[in-house]
Image (spheres, grey):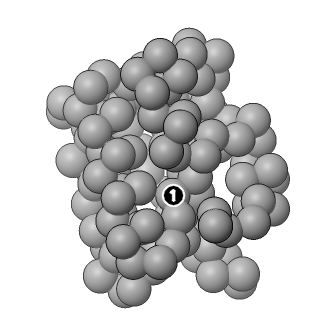
Amino acid sequence: MHVAVTNREDGVALVSVHGPIDLSTAPQLREAMHALFDTGQARIVVDLADVDSCDSIGLGTFAYGHNHCVASGGFLRLAAPPPPLANLLRVVGLTGPIPVHDTIEDALRAGAPA
């Protein structure tokens, strides 16, 4: 898995993930989130377009990131999940608390949750 972080001018961090998110790779995603949290960043969009699989550890990483962002007054949004991942997020109930958008642009344009 490869994780790239882009700090945007609008104050939102775009985290792009390529490859599987699983037991062996999820710690890399969590470390990227921690690096953002350490700088006070709590407005994060995760680009999932190039994620080919995700296990329960990966799903837990999304929940962890969401909880931390919300507690800090920000948000975690998931963007562009491939259909199997979008279905998984729906089935496990993460699409209720965590906003999931069809495109990165939609996630970046979305207003902050109330």
Q: Quadrant of residue 30?
A: bottom left
Residue 42's x, y, as percent? 46, 74
Numbered disc 1: secondary structure: strand
Decide which of 87, 1 is in the foreground and name it.
87
Q: Residues within 10 Å of mark 1 (few under 14, many from 20)?
A: many
Q: Is residue 10 visible to us here?
A: yes
Horizontal side, residue 39 vs residue 111: left or right: left
Task: Indicate the quadrant containing the N terminus: top left, top right, bottom left or bottom right.
Answer: top left
Horizontal side, residue 79 vs residue 74: left or right: right
Task: Indicate the quadrant containing the C terminus: top left, top right, bottom left or bottom right.
Answer: bottom right
- From the viewer's perspective, is residue 28 above or below residue 103? below
Residue 68's x, y, as percent? 33, 65
Residue at point 61% right, 30% down? 81
Amino acid type, mark 1: Leu
Decide which of 21, 98 is in the foreground and name it.
98
The residue that disc 1 covers is 76
Residue at point 54% right, 34% down? 95
- From the viewer's perspective, is residue 40 above or below residue 49? below
Residue 66's x, y, as percent? 41, 55
Residue 72's x, y, as percent? 39, 78
Residue at point 76% right, 59% down? 110
Horizontal side, residue 55 vs residue 106: left or right: left
